[in-house]
Image (tube, grey):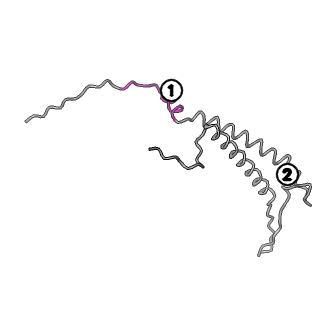
Amino acid sequence: MLLSLKLTEQPPPEKKSFRKEYIAFLIAFGIIGLAIAFVIGQAASKLVTSVVKDIIDPTVGLFLPSGSLDNLSVNITGISGVPSQFKYGDLISNIIDFVIISVIVFIAYKVLSKYKLVEDKTKPEEKKE
């Protein structure tokens, strides 16, 4: 007994050039928007870091005996008798930097979700029936 298979002939898929496939990939995954957001985020981060280093640190330094937030440190002598210096002033400066950036990102998120430009993940999802 012979089985005959009927194959449906389909035209071969259109061959795309590498450039066309690459552009389709960038559009499908939103890479261009992500790249733009990354560049803007880097610029905003530099701006906030500059504000912290050039305005906030010297202002706080006015009230410190060391005169600068970056100069805050503690010397501790270890078991071997060798002193170690822990510079915690720069850490405090970086924490201030992080808090300001995270607050800016949160505010941007809230504004974008208000205008429905981004999905608000903080609100419970409505059940669709």
Under tag 2, what secondary structure? Answer: helix
Residue type, numbered disc 2: Asp
Q: Looking at the image, which residue is at 76% across and 53% down? A: 94
Q: Looking at the image, which residue is at 10% across and 34% down? A: 2
Disc with the residue nearer the chain's start (1 vs 2): 1
* Quadrant occupied by the C terminus: top left
**Image: 50 above or below 68:** above
Residue that badge 1 annotates: 19
Is residue 27 one of those drawn in magenta? yes
**Going by the image, does 28 lie left or right of 34?**
left
Q: Position of residue 127 (x, y in %)?
A: 48, 47
Residue that badge 2 annotates: 57
Q: Looking at the image, which residue is at 75% across and 55% down? A: 95
Question: In terms of image quadrants, where is residue 113?
Answer: top right
Classify mark 2: residues with Cα within 10 Å, few (<14), some (14-19) or many (20+).
many
Cα–Cα gap, marks 1 and 2: 49 Å
**Image: 129 above or below 92:** above
Classify mark 1: residues with Cα within 10 Å, few (<14), some (14-19) or many (20+).
few
**Image: 83 above or below 29:** below
| Segment colored magenta | 13-28
**Going by the image, does 54 lie left or right of 15?**
right
**Image: 111 above or below 7:** below
